[in-house]
């Protein structure tokens, strides 16, 4: 059957639409210019008519007859006088043009007194940084002309600078981060602290643009985000660097709708940043971000949570469909992570066999598996004190080989524990988030690049910066996703989180095998038990600590199965070698 080509508007619709919009805008501008006198006269006639109406209404009824008679006489005289009608029309048009003129007061040219004073003091403060003794014609000199250096400026209602374009001499070392940082620090201090500034360095044109950034919205609560599978919303940012927006509800009760630019992190086999590291000061919202990620991950995948903080902040997820484990103890954490390492290897081997047989990857290797670790360094200290294996060491396989196996690792910890994180964690987490107050040095150390905005001292919880791989550093506000079991949580936020939780498939009191007191003996080999919820979707078996008896009602005891027992772990290196052969 012959195919008809798509109409042009559908094939290159967006370019054509943009062109049409541009044409329409130009035509409208030209028409406004041409019709400007007509518009002014019409506006004037309207004003004259309404003035006449007001006058008529204000005239007492007994005098209206006299007024009417005077007007009729005037009309008669004008009509009978030579050129009378013509002169009357010209006079009326002139009066209408005068009445219809644009009366909005013109903005004063240039800054007023205090504003000029502010700009001058800023100029003087910059002199030592932007001048040298050898410069014969310095752009910056004490007592010099600030207007030559500041080509554009804008102020807010309180008289503080909101935008400034600074020309600087070509010899200023704008390629050196230290030189930039000195200028940025000075400008943010002199222009008013407590606000966030964006600095745009145009190295080619020797221009620095300083802009005050509006605070990011803090009233966005957890909600279903419109994203594709494999996309996770970390939070929201400025519209300057992100083109895409998400339709969101916000406000105390989700009563308003708005499109907001998100920071979207892509995971899975094609991701270039398959694992995430979140760092922050205590109370900055790292657990909240993990909870937000877990709720999104549960749409398409399974989740294992390891909570070194042991504050019960993930209790709401226990027993939910897709949540394979919520571990708060060292033994449980170790067992789960051992299982996760074996599961990664199993997936790699299964996918490799399928590749070799020319089949698509098996279904049970494709469902995303998420390992979410909150404060794993707490377990590192415990394990060291107990002479046991550091659970972080078990992350090596999921981190190195997780991407093709659809295994994603998210680690959250405190900023000052950065050095205590295991080398593979620091090496393989190319997506990074820093929440809460942090110095420029800390941000650069974690993100690998300084943000283009000034960090502020006081930030709301969930505020920070995100960087995906080698991309730009984004400001970030995490959606409020509080612990619904926390008394301090507002009803609206509690309900928002509860609405996103998957149904309970395992009663909460059947879960504690993973939360039970730890056995005296360290676990060396995990035993796998298939829980109903895992087996129904052909998800991997869930680990139970060796030496811990599975409760009778937990699942078929005979499912502590030969298959599972026979799943002797294959080293990841072997699996990878096999897959590449
Ligand atoms: N994005 C956010 N919006 C609103 N409130 C938030 C946000 N993130 C965190 N909070 C609030 O801040 C408080 C601390 O959050 P959270 O427990 O997630 O921080 P944390 O970094 O994990 O702290 P800790 O290390 O002490 O557990 C909580 O009351 C939480 O509800």
Image: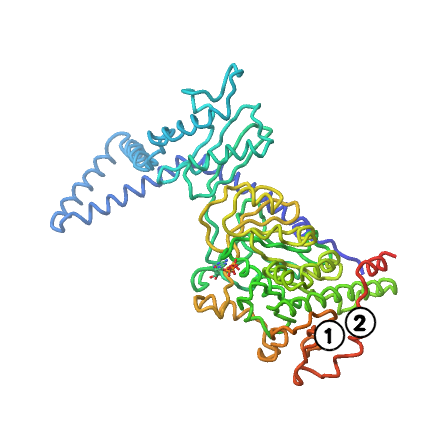
Q: Closer to the camera, 417 or 325?
A: 417
How many labels, in total? Answer: 2
Using the image, determine if residue 155 lies above or below residue 478: above
Q: Closer to the camera, 384 or 80?
A: 384
Q: Secondary structure at mark 2?
A: loop
Left or right: where 425 falls relative to 159: right
Q: Position of residue 491 (x, y in %)?
A: 44, 69
Q: Position of residue 34 (x, y in %)?
A: 45, 34
Which is more N-terminal, label 1 or label 2? 1
Q: Is mark 2 within 8 Å of ligand 1?
A: no
Q: Is mark 1 within 8 Å of ligand 1?
A: no
Instruction: Name the residue furthest bottom.
Output: 552
Instruction: Name the residue furthest top.
Output: 136
Q: Position of residue 443 (x, y in %)?
A: 56, 45
Left or right: where 363 falls relative to 315: right
Using the image, determine if residue 219 lies above or below residue 545: above
Q: Secondary structure at mark 1?
A: strand
Colour pattern of the rendering: rainbow
Mark linked to residue 163: none
Give the spatial CA distance, label 2 vs label 1: 9 Å
Q: Are marks 2 and 1 in contact (CB under 8 Å)?
A: yes
Residue wearing tag 2: 567
Left or right: where 116 falls relative to 551: left
Q: Closer to the camera, 581 or 516?
A: 516
Residue wearing tag 1: 528
């Amino acid at each position: 059957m012959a195919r008809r080509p798509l109409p042009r508007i559908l094939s290159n619709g967006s370019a054509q639409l943009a062109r049409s919009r541009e044409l329409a805008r130009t035509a409208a501008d030209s028409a406004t210019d041409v019709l400007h006198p007509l518009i002014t006269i019409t506006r004037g006639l309207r004003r004259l008519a309404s003035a006449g109406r007001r006058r008529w209404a204000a005239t007492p009824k007994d005098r209206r007859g006299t007024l009417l008679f005077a007007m009729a006489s005037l009309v008669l005289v004008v009509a009978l006088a030579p050129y009378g009608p013509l002169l009357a029309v010209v006079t009326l048009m002139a009066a209408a043009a005068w009445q219809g003129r644009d009366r909005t007061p013109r903005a004063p040219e240039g800054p007023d007194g205090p504003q000029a004073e502010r700009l001058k003091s800023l100029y003087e403060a910059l002199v030592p940084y932007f001048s040298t003794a050898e410069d014969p014609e310095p752009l910056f000199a004490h007592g010099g002309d600030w207007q030559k250096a500041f080509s554009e400026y804008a102020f807010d209602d309180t008289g503080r600078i909101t935008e400034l374009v600074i020309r600087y001499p070509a010899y200023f070392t704008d390629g050196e981060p230290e030189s930039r940082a000195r200028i940025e620090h000075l400008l943010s201090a002199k222009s008013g602290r407590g606000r966030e500034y964006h600095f745009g360095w145009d190295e080619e044109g020797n221009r620095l643009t300083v802009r005050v950034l509006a605070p990011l919205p803090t009233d966005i609560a957890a909600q279903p985000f419109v994203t594709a599978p494999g996309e996770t919303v970390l939070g929201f940012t400025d519209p300057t660097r992100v083109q895409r927006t998400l339709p969101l509800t916000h406000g105390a009760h989700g009563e308003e709708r708005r499109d907001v630019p998100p920071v979207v992190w892509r995971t899975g086999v094609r991701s270039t940043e398959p694992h995430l590291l979140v760092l922050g000061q205590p109370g900055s919202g790292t657990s909240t971000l993990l909870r937000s990620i877990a709720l999104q991950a549960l749409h398409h995948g399974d989740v294992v949570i390891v909570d070194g903080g042991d504050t019960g902040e993930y209790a709401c997820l226990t027993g939910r469909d897709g949540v394979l484990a919520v571990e708060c103890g060292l033994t449980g954490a170790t067992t789960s992570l051992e299982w996760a390492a074996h599961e990664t290897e199993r997936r790699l081997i299964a996918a490799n066999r399928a590749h070799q047989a020319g089949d698509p990857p098996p279904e049970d290797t494709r469902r995303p598996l998420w390992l979410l670790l909150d404060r794993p360094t707490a377990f590192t200290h415990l394990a060291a004190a107990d002479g046991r294996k550091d659970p972080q060491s078990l992350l090596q396989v999921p981190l190195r080989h997780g991407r093709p196996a659809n295994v994603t690792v998210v680690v959250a910890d405190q900023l000052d524990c950065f050095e205590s994180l295991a080398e593979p964690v620091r090496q393989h987490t190319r997506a990074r988030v820093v929440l809460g107050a942090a110095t420029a040095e800390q941000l650069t150390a974690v993100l690998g690049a300084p943000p283009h905005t000034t960090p502020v001292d006081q930030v709301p919880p969930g505020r920070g910066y995100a960087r995906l791989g080698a991309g730009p550093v984004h400001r970030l506000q995490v959606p409020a996703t509080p612990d619904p079991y926390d008394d301090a949580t507002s009803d609206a936020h509690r309900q928002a989180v509860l609405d996103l939780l998957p149904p309970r498939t395992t009663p909460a009191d059947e879960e504690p095998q993973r939360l039970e007191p730890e056995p005296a003996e360290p676990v060396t080999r995990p035993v796998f038990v298939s829980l109903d919820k895992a087996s129904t979707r052909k998800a991997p078996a869930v680990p139970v600590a060796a030496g811990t008896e599975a409760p009778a009602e937990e699942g078929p005891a005979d499912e502590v199965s030969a298959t599972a027992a026979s799943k002797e772990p294959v080293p990841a290196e072997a699996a990878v070698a096999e897959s590449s052969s």
